[in-house]
Amino acid sequence: MSGSSDSIFGDTDAYLFGEGTHARLHDHLGGRLAADGLGASFAVWAPNARSVSVIGDWNGWDPRADPLAVRADRTGVWEGRSAQARQGQAYKFRIVADGGRVLEKADPLALLAEAPPATASRLWSLDHDWGDGDWMLADVEQPDAGARHLTAPLVGGEFAELSPEMILRERYARGDIELDQFEREMAALLQRERTN
């Protein structure tokens, strides 16, 4: 494993972490695959550890194979990289505490975990090529909301037809009609309700 050049936990992360305002720790701690899928970076907070390593399928669960290095900034974050780690492989953090106690812990910020009773984390990526780029870019004219049969979910999984007033409010909220048209149509709806 190598140190800070492959870090997923940078100086800004350390600063925000230290002041307790980091809102995206899940992006910077844990096991994260490299963009090309060849290898993974690891970072874990273990402030009272004597040593930390990553053990997993790719290294035969050998605690000497992929040691992590503690950051010099006193955050208690240990980090490193393994070039052999691949998507789907199981891993854990092996932590040796100050008193010599050895702990093998699942990654608390893993993107995938084994099903019980197994307890390891699995390297995974949330990247996905949806293949709908052409559809998303297509200039498809949306049908008029008033011309559609609209329903709304009710408790218990049943559906009810939306009232003309709710359809009109939806059309305005989506920007299908301007305020003056909304006001005219709403006034007409209310007038019809009073006469019925």
Image: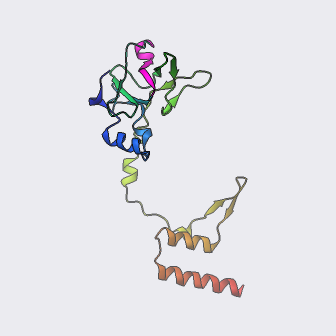
Q: Residue at x 56, y 23 (%)?
A: 119
Q: Which residues are magenta?
A: 48-61
Residue 50 is one of the magenta-drawn residues: yes
Residue 76 rendering spot, x and y as whole percentages: 40, 31
Question: Which residue is at the far left?
Answer: 5
Q: How is the image coloured?
A: rainbow
Image vertical order of residue 20 relative to residue 6, above or below? below
- Looking at this view, is 69 or 120 the one in front? 69
Q: Is residue 74 left or right of residue 173?
A: left
Residue 158 rendering spot, x and y as whole percentages: 71, 56
Q: Is residue 131 visible?
A: no
Residue 84 is one of the magenta-drawn residues: no
Q: Is residue 155 left or right of residue 147?
A: right
Residue 128 rendering spot, x and y as whole percentages: 41, 38
- Looking at this view, is 117 or 136 the one in front? 117
Q: Residue at x 48, y 79 (%)?
A: 179
Question: Where on the picture, by quarter, is residue 155?
Answer: bottom right
Q: Is residue 167 visible?
A: yes
Q: Is residue 167 left or right of residue 42?
A: right
Image vertical order of residue 158 relative to residue 35, above or below? below
Q: Residue at x 61, y 71 (%)?
A: 166
* Total tally of numbered discs in the picture: 0
Q: Residue at x 37, y 59 (%)?
A: 139
Residue 103 rendering spot, x and y as whole percentages: 52, 19
- The quadrant of the picture occupied by the C terminus is bottom right
Image vertical order of residue 58 relative to residue 158, above or below? above
- Looking at this view, is 196 or 58 the one in front? 58
Question: Which residue is at the far front?
Answer: 99
- The quadrant of the picture occupied by the N terminus is top left
Q: Is residue 149 left or right of residue 34?
A: right
